[in-house]
Image: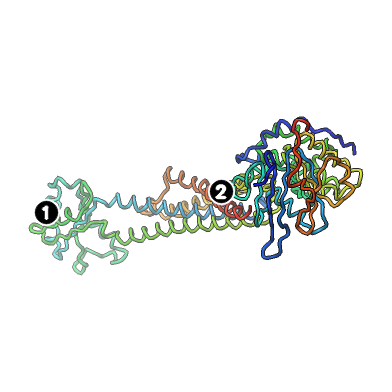
Amino acid sequence: MGTRFAIPPETDTVSGKARSSASPRIGERSSGLIQQARLSGPMPWVIAIMTALTVIATAAGLSLANLAENARSEIAGGLTVQIVEGAPMERDRQAELAVTLLEERADIARVRRVPDAELHALLAPWLGSEVGSGDDAIPTPALIDVQLVGDVTGASLAELRESLANSVPAARVDAQAGWLGPVFAAISSLQWLAIVLVLLLAATSAAAVWLAARSALGSNRDTIEIVHLLGGNDRQIAGIFQRSIAMDAVIGGGIGLLLGLVAIVLLGRQFARLGSGMVAGGGLGPADWLYLALVPVLAVVLAVLTARVTVLSALRRML
Amino acid sequence: MMSGSDGAIVQFDNVGLRYGADAEVLSDVSFTLFPGSFYFLTGASGAGKTSLLRLLYLAQRPTRGVVRMFGTDTITVPRGHLPGFRRRIGVVFQDFRLVPHLSVSDNVALPLRISGVAEADIRKPVADMLAWVGLDQRAGAFPATLSGGEQQRVAIARAVIARPEVLVADEPTGNVDPDMALKLLRLFEALNRLGTTVVVATHDVHLLQKVPDSLIMRLDRGRLSDPTGALRYPPRRDPAVL
C-alpha cells in the first residue's frame, strides 16, 4: 500500500482555524453535501407554478386597481343634469337656462349639453331608432354633462340642486360616481379576492417548501448527523438547505415569472380587443411591472426563510 | 470534585447512561484523561464501549453524573456551544459514516470545511493526508467503490485532518488485516506523540500489547474496572516529553 507514517505538516496550519465555534459557511462545495434532484425534482416546478399563479393574481389585482383609479379620476368631478320634462319646448327652454346658469358658476369647469341626436343614438339599441322623434315618440330627458373644478361632494351636489331648483324645476342633478358605485364595489371585491389569492398562494408555497425541506432532512439524515458530529452547527446545516432551496426557488421563480408574464400579455391583448374605455384603464404601468418582477424575488425570500425555520426547528431536536 | 484532575482534557465522574426506561448501559463510570495519553477501551460486545464513546464525542448526554471536556461541564453547557467542542474531537466511527455521495477527498476535507477553512487552504492538507493513509490514488473515488479497509482509512484521515485534541476511534482496525491494523495503530501513535489524546475502542487483545505506554480501560456490563485507580487518578505526564 505504501502508507507513510508522517503527519502532514500542513495540518498544523489548519488546526488553529479548526478551533472556532463560529458558524462559517461550510464552503463553496457545501451544496454537494445534500443530494439534490434540481430540475428533475418537483420543487422548482412547484415554485414555478406558484410564482406564475401569484404573478397572474398580482397582475389582476394591480389591473383592477388601475381600472378603478382611472374610472374614479375620470368621473370624480362629473355630474349629470337631466331635464325631465315631457313638453319638448319647455324641456329645451329649461335645458338652455340650466346650461346658462351652470356656465356662470366659478366652481364648474365644463358644461356640455349632450346633443339630442347623440342621446337618441345611445338609446336606440333599447328603444328603437324612432326614439325622440315624431308624435308617438317616447319623451327622453335632455342631458347636460357637467365637470366640476374639484370632486363632487355631498355638499356641492346639494348646493347645485338648490341653485337650480327655482329656475329649472325639471332638473335632476346626480353625481356620475353614484351610477358606477356598484361597479366600484365589485372591483373592490375582486381586488380583495386577488389579495387573498396571493396570500393563499404564498401560504401554499411555504407549505410546499416546508414539505420539501422535511423530506430533504429525512433523506439526508445520515449526512446531517455526520456534519453535526464533526462540529457543524445548526446555522451551517440550515445554510446548506437554504442555499439548495434558494437555487430551486431562483430557477422556479424565473420560470414562473416567465409563464406568468406570457399569460398576462396574452390576456392583455384579449382585453384590449374589447375596445372598452373602462377596460383600457386597467393597463399596467412601469411600477406595476416592477411589482410583478418582485414576485419571484419574494418567492425566493419566502422559500429560504421557510427552509431555515423548518430545518432549525428540526435540528433543535438533536443534541 | 476529584483530585488530581487539574489539566485534565476529559473527566467523567459517576456517569450513568440509560436509554429510555431500560437498565443503565453505563453505571458509575469515572475516569480522567490527560492530554497526550493513549487509551485502549476494551470489553465484550454489549459492554457499553460504543455508548461510552458516544458520550466522549458528545453525541449523547449522560443520564446522570458529570462529564467535563476541555475543562467545561458539557452537561450544562448550552447546546449551541457543543459544535465548538466537537471540532476539537476527531471521531472514527465503527461503521465509518462516510458521506456516500462525496468523493474520498471531499469526505476528508469535511471537518476543514465545517471549520471554515478557505478552499485554497484545503487542497494540500487533504492531498497530504490521503497520501499519509495511502489513498492518494483514490482521491476522486466514492466510498461505495472502496474496500472496507480503504473506507476505514478515509474515516481515519477525516478524523485527524483538523488535528483534534482528542481522537476517539471505535474498532478502527476491525475491517483490516493485521498488517494494516498495525500500520493504522502507528498512525494513531504518531498523532499521539504530537499531543493528541487517543482513545481506541477494540476487542483485539493483541492490539493492546502494541502500544507499551497505553492505559487500558476495561468495561464490563457498563462498569469501568479500574483496580489500580490509574484511570481515575492517572499519573501526570509531563507535556514537555510528549
In the rendered structure, find residue A97 and report the number of the disc placed on it: 1
Cα separation between marks 2 and 1: 70 Å
Q: Residue A55, percent across and down?
A: 49, 52
Q: Residue A50, percent across and down?
A: 54, 55
* Residue found 62% across the figure and 40% down from its top: A21
Q: Residue A275, percent across and down?
A: 40, 53
Q: Nearer the viewer, mark 2 or mark 1?
A: 2
Closer to the camera, B66 or A219? B66
Residue type at the position of mark 2: Val
In the rendered structure, find residue A304 and report the number of the disc placed on it: 2
Closer to the camera, A115 or A185? A185
Looking at the figure, which quarter contains the N terminus of chain A? top right
Q: In the rendered view, would you say A5 is above or below A114?
A: above
The disc, 2 or 1, on the residue closer to the chain's N-terminal end is: 1
Neighbor class of circle 2 (other Cα within 10 Å; few <14, some 14-19, many 20+) is: many
Would you say the residues marked 2 and 1 are in contact, meaning their CB atoms lie under 8 Å apart?
no
Closer to the camera, A19 or B232? B232
Left or right, residue B35 beside residue A56: right
Q: Residue B175, percent across and down?
A: 86, 50
Chain bearing tag 1 is A
